[in-house]
Amino acid sequence: MSGQEWPGGKRARLGSAPHVLPAGNRVTVVLGAQWGDEGKGKVVDLLSLDADLVCRCQGGNNAGHTVVVDTVEYNFHLLPSGVINHNATAFIGNGVVIHLPGLFEEAEKNLKKGPGESFSVSIWVFNFHQAVDGIQEHQRQQQGGKNLGTTKKGIGPAYASKASRTGLRICDLLADFNEFSKKFKVLAQQYKTSYPTLNIDTEAELEQLKIYAEKIRPLVKDGVYFMYQALHGPSKKILVEGANAALLDIDFGTYPFVTSSNCTVGGVCTGLGIPPHYIGKVYGVVKAYTTRVGVGTFPTEQNNEIGETLQTRGREFGVTTGRKRRCGWLDLVLVKYAHMINGFSALAVTKLDILDTFEEIKVGVEYHLDGKQIPYFPANQELLNKVTVKYKDLPGWRRSTEGARTFDDLPSEAQAYIRFIESYLGVPANPGILNLQSPVTLFPPLPPGGLINQILQLSPFTGWVSSITFSN
């Protein structure tokens, strides 16, 4: 096969053409790098002060972010938490499964206004999806003695409907309601057949959906065209808020104890309908220790006084379920695996202050199986459950980091802890220091330019953020 003729008479081989990125805006992405609850909402909230468009690309109302602004608390499950910036447009992409009553309840409670723009091909979560989620969890517990620990929000059954091509989309509801009603009744009957104890009042649900259809109609856009215009139009700062986290990804997470969507960077493209070369910076949010909700293998878990201290000091309770989070040391094998998949531009390390009281801090740096180090993160849960963790012991700092205003204000041991994380993962960073309250309180507003070396005093959540700015 002949190569292309370049100036000067030279022939270029296939794939050797100079790579020129197309013009247009880039999206800045914030993703969780562990099992969720890393503090993504806090980072998103700060970045959203500068944003023109904030997007959700996957998940449903099984994720939860809490933000506090001027003593007012906001709880987000479906809406991008950046929507509290009233100058930003909120967009819910096709990768999100939407429970309409929950969406409007959340918008009314938090914003006293509508929920923003939605993609016309997003899949619905119906009430019976939520009921089925609960039934399935009960059956797992009865049959195998172990459930998946779902939030019972209907997310798994809704994504299952999508994969089996029986799910109903926003565009179905807004087209011919009679046709939608027929499809809805067929879907409901399928679930009734599979779950005889399931009680579905189809007529009542259809009446409710008819009301919601008119409420949501003005907000629905063709998402591909909407995002194309955002990327190719006037200069915009576009922020994408990932839900859940890398180790909960349906493909790359600790399966089967995962969520039902792609929480890694690929989910941004498929969940918003955008090409990959429009993804700019990808920030991984990492808690300074590790937590996990529900069941599943957890190599660095501490079922002892250390775990209790982390749980108590970190106030580790789920936003959506209120469940206690399991706690353990930071696992850098796990975070590096997340980095391999997502290619993080930089990291935001959160809740550093929770470690303030420890004399010694351990960090998981290697997995060993049958006495040998394994250079990868095991996909098989039985293997993962058998690994032994090799730790790096680092000295604690035994004093408060809450008053730190710059990176140099941190105790030398805390600086060394951050530098060790950076060195291990190989993610370049120009560090700044952020002190954030949990939930987030904001004061003062950020000046133009994003988060480079900006300092906010908001204890008791201390995070270290490596040069976070918007993609150009």
Image (cartoon, rainbow, N blue to C red):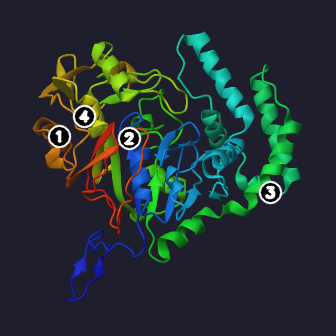
CB of mark 4 within 8 Å of CB of mark 1? yes
- The disc at residue 437 is 2
Label 3: how many Cα within 10 Å (few below 14, some 14–19, many 20+): few
**Within 10 Å of the Cα at label 1, are there few (<14), some (14-19), or many (20+) other Cα atoms?**
few
Q: In the rendered image, which residue does mark 1 sit on?
A: 424
**SS at mark 3?**
helix
> Which residue was labeled with disc 3?
214
Q: How far apart are marks 4 and 2 (CA)?
A: 25 Å
Mark 3: which amino acid? Glu
Which amino acid type corresponds to the residue marked 1 in the rendered image? Answer: Tyr
Quarter-wise, where is residue 382 in the image?
Answer: top left
Alpha-carbon distance for marks 3 and 1? 53 Å
Going by the numbered disc 2, the residue's amino acid type is Gln
Circle 4 Cα neighbour tier, 10 Å, few/some/many (<14 / 14–19 / ≥20): many
Query: What residue is disc 4 on?
Result: 332
The outermost residue toward the front is 71
Question: 249 and 89: which one is in front?
Answer: 89
